Amino acid sequence: MITFDIHIHTRRYSGCSFIDYEDIVGQAAAARLDGIAVTEHGMRWPDEEFGRLRKMAADRGIVVINGQEINTFNAANRSEGEFLVFGVHRSLTRACSATELIQTVHEEGGIVIAAHPYKLSRGGRSHYYGAGDLVYKLKLDGIELCHPDHSELAMKKVKKAMDELKIPGTGGSDAHKILNIGSCVTIFDNPVSDEVDFIKEIRAGRIRAEKR
Ligand SMILES: [Zn+2]
Ligand SMILES: [Zn+2]
């Protein structure tokens, strides 16, 4: 059983995070994770720098995946939710709709996971920081099930979407503070040693989510 926290922000590239990237490998090991993914807001770690992070992690037996978390907007400039993107080898900073984002990512061989789709915004009941019911109109590869800000009701809604859309649910801590790393995880049935395995296993749905 291979355990990953696939949703982590560091303050290297996410202004809102308190996590020093030098600390994430040690914390991942302490949380008994086999791997982690960095998913900074609106950008992907530059390859050379990420290579150093990956090496640092590999020395301790931890796999690191280079992802990103992208906000999307409709024509009226309202948010269509945030999405975790893996397998696209450039930063996807340009604002676009959720449908456009997914099309671009798929053309470039990557996968898209709806981040915290039913995390309530301060706006109240039917307003979300995520895609909400828009997930039913999208060609997603996965949907975040276990997230610290997902209530029981939110998880029920995600499970319904997983069933209807036949996509797997993931778990990620969305950590902005070091001790939160590993609070929600994605468990893989098969070994994952790099991005290729990571994407293949999620596409095949050979994963499950867990809150710890
Ligand atoms: Zn987010
Ligand atoms: Zn996030």
Image (cartoon, rainbow, N blue to C red):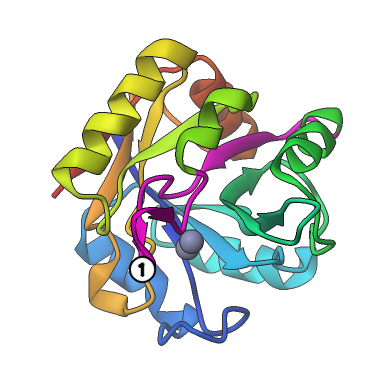
Q: Residue at x 40, y 23 (%)?
A: 161
As for residue 120 lying within the magenta part, the answer is yes
Task: Name the element at disc 1.
Answer: loop
Indicate left or right for 158 with 93 as reference: left
x, y percentage for residue 137? 61, 25
Q: Is residue 135 magenta?
A: no
Residue 103, by quadrant, is: top right
The region drawn magenta spans 108-131
Residue 6: % across, % down: 44, 50
> Dot 1: within a 10 Å radius of its alpha carbon, few (fewer than 14), some, or many (20 or more) residues?
many
Residue 183 placement, left or right of 113: left
Relative to 33, is 155 above or below?
A: above
Q: Position of residue 28 (x, y in %)?
A: 31, 62
Q: Residue flagged by tag 1: what amino acid is it?
A: Ala
Answer whether residue 199 is visible to the viewer in this image: yes
Q: Observer-nearest residue: 71 or 136? A: 136
Taking the spot 52% from the left edge, 84% from the top edge, the residue there is: 11
Image quadrant where residue 178 sits: bottom left
Q: Nearer the viewer, residue 112 or 130?
A: 130
> Would residue 1 be seen by someone viewing this image from the given angle?
no
Viewed as shown, does residue 178 lie left or right of 194? left
Q: Name above or below for residue 12 compared with residue 92.
A: below
Residue at point 15% right, 42% down?
A: 152
Closer-to-camera residue (186/30): 186
On the image, numbered disc 1 is attached to which residue? 175
Identify the image quadrant of residue 200.
top right
